[in-house]
Image: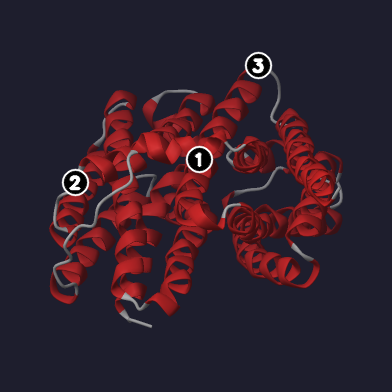
Amino acid sequence: MDKRVYLLTIVSFIVGLVELILGGILDLVAFDLGVTLGQVGMLISIFSLVFAVFGPILLTATAKMERKKLTLIALVVFFFANLLAVLSSGYAMLLVARIISAMSGALLIALCVTIASNIVSEEFRARAIGIVFMGISASLVLGVPAGLMLGNAFGWRAPFIMITALTALSFIGVYFLMDKIEPKPALSIKKQLQTLKNRKILLIQLTSFLFLAGHLTLYAYLTPFLRMTMGMDGTWISMMYLIFGVAAIIGGGVGGMLADRFGTKPTIVGVIIVFAVSIFTIPYTTSILPLFLVVMVVWSMLSWAITPAIQSYLIETAPETSDIQQSLNNSALHFGIAAGSMIGGIVIEQSTVEMNATVGGVFVLFSLGVVIMSMAKRKEKALSTAA
């Protein structure tokens, strides 16, 4: 395995931090900028939406540029976008910073994945891509607690100062350690989207979207949920996020093991069912801390346990376009994050934060119905072929 893959993983981790880092400091940003919690939550939605849309577009638009040079340019743009966030004096300025960082970050993630697959031998290609995606997953899980701890200690701008510093270090690492990499012919956006004409693949991607949307409806607003339902202060909330983050990372590994042992389809269905039970149950456990912790750990572990099984299921279903499906699945996940953050913001504005769990659970049940449709369709096709 080429050690430079781990440098790319660090880059993907830093980029991923920005997406959800506002989740733990919603109240701090809202108070400082004089806006509502829902409006700050919308900054997460907008970032995820821009990220999901522009990743494939920018990668295709820059297909003829040398990869190392393009990565360095994207890192510079990402650096100044987050510096703009640090200097933001109002909501509009922070919104612009989020949009620019999302666009440059989406390109960086796409570049990290493609470069990682190019600098290793074919036998290590899948592993290299998996390692880069681990950086993304870890950042999405750890971004909120990192932002919460730094934000409570030094103010909401502190997490963005950390990200600008880490981005500068990443630039230095890429500049000195990466060789020039000539671009390869890229598949057009149209051809990528044409793979979704396969109904089974479309339903699998939709499953990822609905599952993450349901999860983020509550997770993006976990800080106000803990404050309003359990009266927790910053220290306790930091501990909750730390527990959540560790459990979620473990869950990713557990999900892979379950898929290997029991198969992808039983794992996906089982994870979604237990996850739905946990998210529906959470509001009813807040009066008993030990019970709440148990349910929260289950919820957090299963939030990322489904990802390895979904990716394996995509490879099984469409092995000839597996690389494209992994990229599209990443977009589906970020569309889900955007939708969940947006829906959660609407719920918290129109009702109470306790309702976020219930609304999120409904979306999770939708994802269960969609994936069962995908699997049932496949079974019917197999039976008709056998006949």
Mark carried by residue 369: none
Residue 89 percent across, percent down from the top left: 26, 30
SS class, disc 3: helix
Identify the secondary structure beneath mark 1: helix
Q: Is 184 in front, or is 22?
A: 184
Asked whether the viewer can see residue 48, the reply is no
User: Which of the marked residues, 3 or 2, is nearer the chain's N terminus?
Assistant: 2
Tell me the element at label 2: helix
Of all residues, the one furthest to the top in this rendering is 350
Kind of residue indicated by mark 3 = Gln
Task: Please give the residue where the numbered disc 3 appears in the rendered image.
Answer: 350
- Is 207 on the left-hand or right-hand side of 324? right
For the residues marked 3 and 2, what is the alpha-carbon distance in whole angstroms? 37 Å
Q: Are marks 3 and 2 in contact (CB under 8 Å)?
A: no
Is 229 located above or below residue 134 in the figure?
above
Say which mark, if any, is on residue 195. Answer: 1
Colour mode of the rendering: secondary structure
- In 3D space, how far apart are the residues under numbered discs 1 and 2 (Cα atoms)? 32 Å
Relative to 13, does residue 147 appear above or below in the rendering?
above
Picture disc at residue 77: 2
Q: Which amino acid type is marked by label 1?
A: Thr
Whole-percent x and y of residue 268? Answer: 75, 53
What residue type is disc 2 on? Val
Report the number of discs: 3
Tell whether label 2 touches label 1 (CB within 8 Å): no
Which residue is pictured at 50% across the width and 32% down the height?
41
The quarter of the picture where the N terminus appears is bottom left
* Residue 210 falls left or right of residue 49: right
Name the residue located 23 percent from the left edge and 42 percent from the top edge.
81
Q: How dense is the environment of label 1, judged by Cα within 10 Å: few (below 14), some, or many (20 and up)?
A: some
- Mark 3, mark 1: which one is toward the viewer? 1
Location of residue 32 by image quarter:
top left
